[in-house]
Amino acid sequence: MTQSASPRQKIQRRPVHGVLLLDKPLGLSSNQALQRAKWLLRADKAGHTGTLDPLATGVLPLCFGAATKFSQIQLDADKTYEALLLLGQKTTTADAEGEVIQTREVPALSAELLARLTRQFSGPQTQVPPMYSALKKDGKALYEYARAGQEVERAPRHIVVHALELALAEDPRAPAALKITVRCSKGTYIRTLGEDIGEAIGCGAHLGMLRRIETGGYLASQSLSLSALEAMSEPERDACLLAPQSLVASAPSVSLDADNAGRFLSGLRRRGSAGHWGANVGENQALVQVYGSDPVAFLGTAHVTANELIPERLLSPIEVQDMLRASQAIACRPVIPIEQGAPTS
């Protein structure tokens, strides 16, 4: 097992480019988990792709170096959660970390009731964000107001619950419980969804467990625990990184020759005729991956308007060279089938 140095020890940072799928442990904030992984990799630049509460576990994609340029795509992605809803008690935080503020009797839970709730809470809807959240009002996080005993007005947000499953469960902490599986749009608070379901039942509820099992195609089953990461050598940690382009792997790809690749990296638009950019790329395409063909190297993203390839997020020449060197030593696992990812020639 690798001996970890003290977090206070000064380490020499290095350029690291890629995506680490971390299974965030219970009790850590997303930023605490990110900083720990950043320290273990000695990475000079890092960011995460969507906050998980300390109570929550599950897949947390961490972006390093060049990958941070494409993290917004993951922030905007749909997500899938599993949760345990404890019925009969409402808490200050809508989860098990808060204090109980209301207790009510739980009515009989029938299959018909669960079916009605599934219909009621599926599809487009509005949701008022909880006070215990990192959203800001007047430059202050909402949880700061909540801890001071203040409640401030929050504007409802439009969300979409794409799929919802409710099933009876048991837990010693509550007279009745429901297991929830939900696939939803960005910005959905599962704590608030659970609390709203509890109100619809008429007994109140709070979350006893929350786990993110998928986000934007990345799965919890692909994720690595912090303890496993700590036990690895540095080359082993590097080998766990997915390529930055895995963040955009569902988009079609375009391959440029050396001359056009250089011009593209300079931010210049490239013109083409119908079908010029490939069979999977239309004359108007919202997002494409762009590669150089000699050698095969990821250059960044673009969009196509009237068959014109227009650069969006570009890697620097240094980042391209760093990633070419790393690719010679590290086999990055694809998340999306190869036909949707990088060209093979």
Image (cartoon, grey):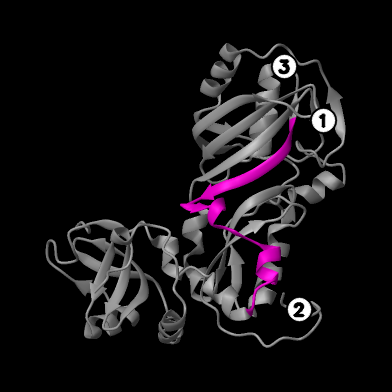
**Dot 1: what SS?**
loop
Mark 3 burial class by Cα count in 10 Å: few <14, some 14-19, many 20+: some
Say whether residue 328 is left or right of residue 173.
Answer: left
Q: Amino acid at mark 3?
A: Gly
Where does label 2 land, which residue?
3
**Dot 2: what SS?**
loop
Q: Amino acid at mark 2?
A: Gln
- The stretch in magenta equals 206-233
Percent of width and height locating residue 257:
22, 81
Mark 2 burial class by Cα count in 10 Å: few <14, some 14-19, many 20+: few
Where does label 3 land, which residue?
202
- Work out whether residue 132 can be spotted: yes
- Work out whether residue 43 can be spotted: no
Q: Are marks 2 and 1 in contact (CB under 8 Å)?
A: no
- The mark that comes first in sequence, 3 or 2, is 2
Tell me the number on the disc at residue 32: none
Q: Quadrant of residue 264?
A: bottom left
Percent of width and height locating residue 146:
81, 44
Where does label 1 land, which residue?
173
**Dot 3: what SS?**
loop
